[in-house]
Image: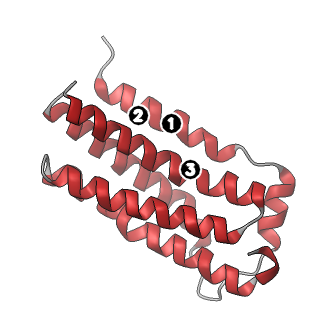
Amino acid sequence: MIKSWMVIGGVAFVVALGANIITPSDRQWFKRLQRPRWLVFEPAIPLIWTTIFICGAWSAYIVWEKNPGNSTTWFLMGLYLLLEIVTIAYTPVMFRLRSLKIGTIIGGAGFIIGVILTLAVLRISGWAALLLVPYLLWSPIGTYTTWEMVRLNPADA
């Protein structure tokens, strides 16, 4: 029998693969952009996001196990999925459109969805809500960084 954590982890993994839908020219565009001087943690960003996605999947697993198959639980699984899709869309959409403003908007939208999800999950499980806190802490940092890059790269806004 397939366990719920396998399905949740598998869906999260498949959605995360969407971040790789970028071309070499997309990467070159982003690499040439100026970054804020304080952005010294850029090499750690993939590890940070991997940790955040693991926490999100674990949170979803806790919520599912509290009340599997319930219509509210399915709705929350949809919110988890929406949050991951919006978060993953940041890179390929911003790169493809070559627009830092779009990246800022997507980052802000992800944060709003994250807050809504966390508040909804809090009623079900404090631990599940706590596992979403890394997203709520990191997402504004990434969004602010992109917003700062708009100022530094006005032609690529």
Q: Is residue 149 left or right of residue 113?
A: right
Residue 2 in the image, given as x and y percentages of width and height: 33, 16
- Mark in front: 1 vs 3: 3
The amino acid beneath tag 1 is: Phe
- Residue lying at 69% horizontally and 80% vertically, measured from the top left: 150
- Residue lying at 69% horizontally and 70% vertically, measured from the top left: 100
The residue singled out by tag 3 in the image is 88
The outermost residue toward the right is 25
Mark 1–mark 2 CB contact (< 8 Å): yes
Foreground pick, 37 / 72: 72
The amino acid beneath tag 3 is: Ile
The residue singled out by tag 2 in the image is 9
Q: CA distance from mark 1 to mark 3?
A: 11 Å
- Residue lying at 46% horizontally and 32% vertically, measured from the top left: 11
The residue singled out by tag 1 in the image is 13
Q: Residues within 10 Å of mark 1 (few under 14, many from 20)?
A: some
Question: Can residue 126 be seen at all in this image of the molecule?
Answer: yes
The amino acid beneath tag 2 is: Gly
